Image (cartoon, rainbow, N blue to C red):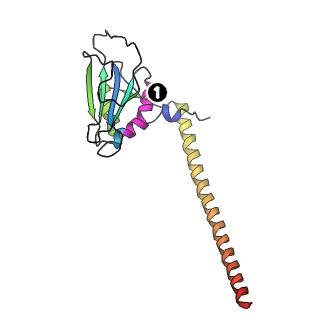
Amino acid sequence: MVSVLQPIRLGPGAALLSKDVKRIHMDFAVKLNDGHLGPRRFWRNYLPRLKYHNPAVPMTVNRTTDQDGPATLTVFFAPPSGSQSPTSSPAPTSSTSQSTLPSEHTPFERAESINMKHKREPEILALLMEVTKATPVEATPEEQAELQELEEQSRRSETDSRRSAEVNEKRQREANVLAQARGDLAEAQAQAA
């Protein structure tokens, strides 16, 4: 049986971040114009996979109304000494405030920003993987078998869809021919009367 979580467990963005990544924060505009499409797609398609594999890393998103503003992904790293300050409350997952730093930001941690503006989601992911030294999650043999089964189902579905469309088109043509014949018959009867 194919797992419901399969699309989240595997695919682009399925990666294990290094242990020193403390938080990820995205900041981009609500609308897609002016280079904010890639960040939005990254947020929608790749960030859920990253979060699935790294549940302990808070990932926040701040969507602003400033279309001309920057689109940044900031990665906050834990201090190298290992003396981390515990957070009293979990970090929010989204925000509409103008602040680019999460509320629990401590000044002694290292932060690296990635400019996402005018970049597509695979480019953003590659930059994030490079900055965080993340390792991609590889599919197990069972998961590969599930993926092959999904691909086969997709192919069968496409074939069935095409066949259905052909049958429906044939029915429509037959109905049109019958309607035209009935129309011609009615017209001939009207002229004869």
- Magenta region, mostly helix, strand or loop? helix
Q: List x then y, in percent, for residue 4.
A: 57, 34
Task: Indicate the quadrant containing the N terminus: top left, top right, bottom left or bottom right.
Answer: top right
| Residue at (51% x, 30% y) in the render | 140
Highlighted magenta segment, given as a residue range: 40-56
Q: Is residue 101 left or right of residue 53?
A: left
Above or below, 164 relative to 125: below
> Dividing the picture into quarters, in which one does residue 116 lie?
top left
Residue 149 place in picture, x, y as percent: 58, 40
The quadrant of the image that shows the C terminus is: bottom right
Please tell me which residue is depicted at 30% across the width and 33% down the height of the picture: 127
- For residue 9: magenta? no
How many other residues sit within 10 Å of disc 1, few (<14), some (14-19) or many (≥20)? some
Residue drawn at (63%, 70%), measured in percent from left and top? 173
Judge whether residue 55 is colored magenta. yes
Numbered circles on residues, count: 1
Tell me: residue 76, above or below residue 193: above
The residue singled out by tag 1 in the image is 52
